Image: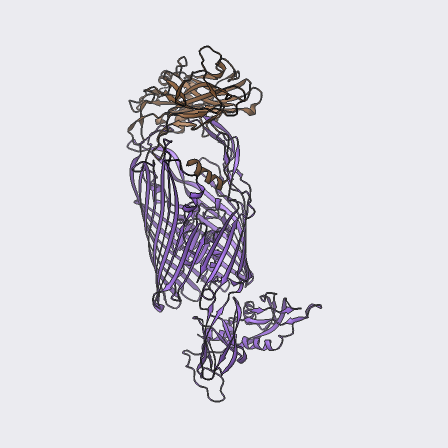
Chain colours: A brown, B purple
Amino acid sequence: MRASLAAVICTAAGCTTFEDPSIVLDLRIVAITASLDPTSSSIIHPTYGPEQVIDIDLTKPPNPTEILAQLKPTTIEVIVADPARHRDLRWSMRLCLLGEDDRCDETHPVIELGSGLISDPDDALTPQRPMADVIPDQQLLAILREAVEANPVQALGGIEYGVEVEIADLVDPTTAIYGAKHLRVAGRIPAGRGANMNPYLNYLDAAIGGIGLLIPRCRCAEADEPDCNIPEMDAGTTVTLFPVEPETVRETYITPTLTGGSAELTETITYQWLAANGSFSDETTGGGHDILGNQSLLGTEWRTPRAVKEPMYVPLWVIQRDERYGVNVLETCIHVVPPL
Amino acid sequence: MLRWSLAIALVAVWSARATADDARPPDPPPPAKPTGVITKQPKLLQAVAPDYPPAALAAGKTAQVKVRIKIDAAGLVAGVDVVDKVGDGFDEAAVAAALQYVFEPAEIDGVPAPITVETTINFVIEQVEEPEPPPQRPPPGAGTPSGPPNHAGDMALPVTIEGTVVERGTRRKLAGVIVSVAELGLDAVSGEDGSFYFHGVPAGTYKVLAVDQKFDRLERPITLAKREKVEVRLWMRPRGGNPYETVVEGEREVLEVTRRTLQRQQLTSVPGTFGDPIRVIQTLPGMQRAPFGLGLLLVRGSNPDDTGIYVDGHEVPSLFHFLGGPSIFNVEMLESLELYPGGFPARFGRKHGGAVALELRPTKSDGIHGSAKVDFIDAGGYLRAPITKDLSFAFAGRRSYIDAFLGFVLPDPPAGGQRIVTPVYYDYAGRLDYEMREDGRLGLFAIGSSDTLRVIDQDPDSAVSTDLSTAVKFFRVIGSYVRPFGDDMKLTLSPAWGRDTLTFTGAQAEAAGPFTSIGVVNNSLSYRARIAGRLSKHVYLDSGLDVLSRVTTYEALLPVDDSLINRDGVDIPPSQFFRGASSLGVGVHADVGIDVSKKLKLIPGLRLDTYIIDGQDRASIDPRIAARYKLRGDLTIKGHLGEFSQPPQPEALDKRFGNPNVGVEHATHVGVGYEWVPHRLWKIDSEIYYVRRRGIIVFEPDLVQNDDGTFEQVRFVNSGRRDSYGFEILIKREISERLFGWLSYTFSRAHQKRPGQDWSATAFDQPHVMNAVASWKPGKGWELGVRFQLASGRPETPVLGATYDADSGNYVPVRGELRSVRVPMFTQLDVRAEKNWLYKTWSLGLYIDIINVTNAENVEATQYDYRFRESAPVTSFPILPTLGVKGTW
C-alpha cells in the first residue's frame, strides 16, 4: 500500500528511482564501532564503548585531573567495503566536535587520531579495518571544554564529541568518503546512570522454505578457511534472516529530564541489512513503534541475485544499533550459484 | 438632483446630434486613404454625459466644444482632440466624456476601419427643481414635457408600449439600455428594473431597437392596434455570446497606494487556475509563484502566514482545500476580490505581509437564479431566490469524488486484506439578506468546508497495517448590518463566529483505538464596527473597531521525549496531553483621506492594537501615511510609508511547547510608484518597494535553566530579520466586450537573517516573476484564454557531499552556502476554451482547461539518493487537461 501510494504521488510529482541503499555497490563505510576493550569480540560479548560516565561534583569546579583519571582509551574501528574495485585504500581519523554535517567543526580544536593504508577490504584474508585510539589527555579535555562552553546547559545531558573518518583511493582524493562516530562523556546524573554498552548478537538465524541454515561469522575472503562453512544458495532464492539476541541486550537505563527528574527507559535495537548483491524486503528492521503503533519484526528476507551465470560469493552485513550510539556488526558471506 | 438633471440634458443634446449625424454624414472626415471609399459612416451607439466643470456651473457659463474623435476599427474611441479650445474646464470635460463613447465602426471598402470625425459637445444648464412636477398635458403649442429616463413620448398620453430589457441566459434585468422606436425617433433608457415605457405611440407597425455597448444590437418589430397597449420583453444577447456578468467597479474612495481588484469574469476564466478566484490573485504583480500550484499567497517576499485573508473584514485561515485543492469559496458568493500587496489600509490588521480582501455579494430578490458545474474532480451548484420582496437567500455547495476514481488507480488489496483510500472534500455556503432600504441592510452569511482522508491497509501476510485518518473542518458565520447615515457615510456592524478543527489519528488497522492522535479546535469570535464616508468635501474617513478573540485547545496522544540526552529511535509510549491557548486582540483603526488640493491627496492612518495572549500583554502602534499626486489627468504618482505588526500565534507562547516571552513582529513598508491610464481600456500601474521585517520569530534549539533547576527549550525567539525589495508593473487591458488581459512583472528579492547566520535568500525568493493573461471572445459563444507564467527557480542549498552517520545508518548532507543556487527557470503555458450556448432563460457552457499545454518539465525541487551523490529534479504538473460543463440560469 505504501508503495502504491508512493507510486501515485511520484507519478504526480516526478519522482526518480535511485540506487538501492541496502546494496553495497562500491566503496562504502559499513559501520564504525567504539570500544573500551578492543581485545574482546564485540559480536558476542557486550563491551563499553561510545559512552563514558564519570563521577563529578556539581558543587565544585571540575577538576581536569580527576576527569582524565576516570576516562579510558576508546578504540575506533571502521568496517569498510569496496566490492567494485580491487585496490588498496588510505584512511585517516580526526577527533573533534562534529558539526551539523557530521564533519569536524574546524572552529574548535581538532586532533589527528591516526592515518594509514589498508589492503583491499574485500580480498584480504585478514580483516582490513582502520583503527585508532581516543586517548584521554589534555587535547581531549580541550575538546570537551569547548563543547561545554558552546552549550553548557545541553552538556548536562552529556558532552558530545566524535570521530570523523575519511577513506579514499590511494592516489585519487576525489574518491574520498566520510563517516562519523559519535561519542559521549556524561556525569553520573542522576546517580543511577550508567554508561551504555554496545549491543551484541548470539547468532544470525536463516531459513529457506522453513529449513534452517547455519550462517557462520566469516567474510567472503575467508571462504576457504576450514572453520567457514559458507552456505550455498541458488540464484533467485529467498532466504529469511533473523537476528537472535541475547536476553540482556536491551539495556534499561536512566536519563535526566528537562523537568529536573529522571526517566527509566529500555533500549530499542535496530538492524540495518546490507549485501553486495540481491535485494532485501526490509533494509532496516526492529526499532520502536511507528506512529500507527506498528513495531517492525527483527528479521528480513533477502533474495539472492537472479542473473547469476557463474558461482559468486556475496558479502552480507548486519549492523545492530541501540539509540545511544551503541553499534555492533556481523559480517558473513553467501555462496550463490546459478540454478541447475 | 441638479447634477443628474444636467447629465440627462446633455445626453439628450448629444443624442439629437447623433441622430442628425445618422441622417447626414458627420462633419467631414479627414481625407480617407486615396484607395479607400467610406462605405458606411460610424454610428454612435452609446454616449456619456460630461461632467459639468463646477466653477463654470457656479458661474452659469455654457459652452460648445468642438472635438475631433478618432474611432478605431472596433468602434472604440482611440483618441480625442479639442479643435477650438474654450477653457473653463470645458475642454477637459468634453474629452473625458468623448473618450467613453462607443460607435458602430465605420467601413471603408466594406471593411470596418478606423476613422476620425468631428462634432460639437454642448454644455447647457438645464436645472430641474425638486420635486419634479407630475406630467401635465401641455397647453397647445407648448413643448413636450420630459419624464424619467425610462419614459419617452408624450407624457401626457397613456403608455402604449411597455417592456423590460432582460439578459439572455441569466434573465437579469438590464438598466441603462437605450430603447428606441426608430420610426418616431423616440428614445428611452431602461430603468434599474429594466423597464421602459413609450407614451402615446399611435397604432401602426414599428421597429423597437435596443442598444447597449455590452450587448448585441436587438431589433424587434411590433404591431400596435388602435387603443391597444403592447407589452414586450427584449432579450439581449451579450456580445461574444457569454453570459458572464461584468461587474464594473464603481467609484470608490482610494485610501491605499496599491490595490488590485479582480472582476468576476476575471476570477473564473483565467486558464490554469481551475476557475479558482483565489488562484487568479497569484498572477498579479507582487506575488511570487507558489510551488506545485498550491494556493500559497506569497506577497512581496513574505511568508504565506504573513498575509491576511479577510472575508468582509474578518480574518480567516487558508481558504483552500488541503493538498493544493480548490478554494472553498464559490465565486458566485463573491462581490470582489482585492489584493493589497503593501502599504495596506489600517482596517486590515495583525499581519505585516499583505492583505487579500474578499467582499461578499449580497443576494437580491430578483428572481430565481443559479448555476451548476461538473468536472473530473468535483461537482457543485449555486442557487439564489427571493423569499419575500425584501428577503432573499443564496446557497452554494460542492463535493469531490476523487475517492471514486482512486479505486481504479490503486492496486487491489491482497486476499484477506483490505485497502480503502477515501479522500473527500466538500464545502457549502449560504446567506440571507434583508433589505431595509433607508434603514440599511441585514445579512447573514455562513460557510463551511470539510476535508477528510482515510487510509486503511491491511495485509494478512504483513506484521504492519495502516489506519490513518485526518480531517480538517472550517466553519464561519458572519453577520452584517450596513446602514447609511448622514450625507455620505456608512456604518457597518459585523459580528462573526468561527470554528476550525484539525484531527489526526494513527492506528493499526486491527486496533480498537488510535495509537497516536492530534486534535486542535480553534474557536474564534470577532466583531468589526466600521464607519466610512465623506466628512466634508475634502475629507474622507474610514475608521473602526476590530476585536478578535480566539480560544484554541489541543489534545494529543503522542510520545514526548524530554530527556536531556541526544538520541535517535527511542521508543517512548504515547501519552495524553491537553493544552489550551487563548488570545484577545482589540484594535482601533483610522485612515483619513484628505484632498489637500485638486491634485494632492494625503492619507494618514493609524492602527492601535492590544493583545492579551495566554495572559501576556502585547501592544503595537502602527502609524502610516500614503499620498497620491495627480500629475495629469491620466497620470498619478503615489507613495506610502508605514508600520505593520503581527502578533505571535497563541501556541507559540505555550509554556510547554513555545516561549511565553515571544513578542510582536514588526515591519516597515515603503514604496513609490505611478498609475498611468493612457486609454480608458488600458492601465499601467508600477511601484518600487522595500519591506523591512524585524523581530521575526525563529526557532531556537538551545536549552535554558530555570530558577528551580529545571530546564526548558527556548524554542522561539524574536531575533530574525527578513527584508525584501523589488519593482513591479502591471499593464492591464480592462474588460471590454471581447477582450481582457494583463501582463505583470515583478522583480523581487527577499533575504533573511537568523542569529549566527549570514543573510540568505528566503525559501520563496524569486527575482523574476512574469504572468501574461489574455481572454478573447471571438463570438458565437466562444471564449478562449491563455496564461503564460515565467518565474525564477526557487533557491536551494547546494549539497557538496555527505557523511555516513555510523550511529543511525543514514547519510548526513554537507551543504554549501544557504540557498545559494536555484532550480531552473519555471515556464508554463495554460490554455482554456469555453463554448456557451445561450437560451432565453438559461445557458450551457462546456470548457476545457489545459494546464501546461506544452508539457514543460518544470523543476520545483531537487531530490537526492540516499548518500547525496545522485540527484534528480522533482517536477511540477505534467500536461493536465480538465473538462467540465456548467449551466447557469
Which image quadrant: the N terminus of chain B?
Answer: bottom left
**Residue A1 horizontal/vertical position (percent):** 41, 36
The answer to which image quadrant residue B35 occupies is bottom right
Residue lying farthest right? Answer: B34
**Residue B872 horizontal/vertical position (percent):** 53, 36
Up-down relation of residue A233 to residue B556 (above or below): above
**Residue B680 horizontal/vertical position (percent):** 55, 63
Residue lying farthest top? Answer: A226
The answer to which image quadrant residue B195 occupies is bottom left
Q: Is residue B270 visible?
A: no
Q: Is residue B397 visible?
A: yes
Lateral position of residue B166 relative to residue B474, left or right: right
Question: Which one is in front, A195 or B398?
Answer: B398
Question: Which one is in front, B770 or B206?
Answer: B206
Residue lying farthest bottom? Answer: B140
Up-down relation of residue A172 to residue B775 (above or below): above
**Residue B636 horizontal/vertical position (percent):** 53, 59
Up-down relation of residue B138 to residue B867 (above or below): below
Lateral position of residue A151 relative to residue B281, left or right: left
Question: Which one is in front, B767 or B407?
Answer: B407
Which image quadrant: the C terminus of chain B?
Answer: bottom left
Question: Which one is in front, A195 or B274?
Answer: B274
Question: How many numbered circles does the render carry?
Answer: 0
Residue at image coords 36%, 50%: B474
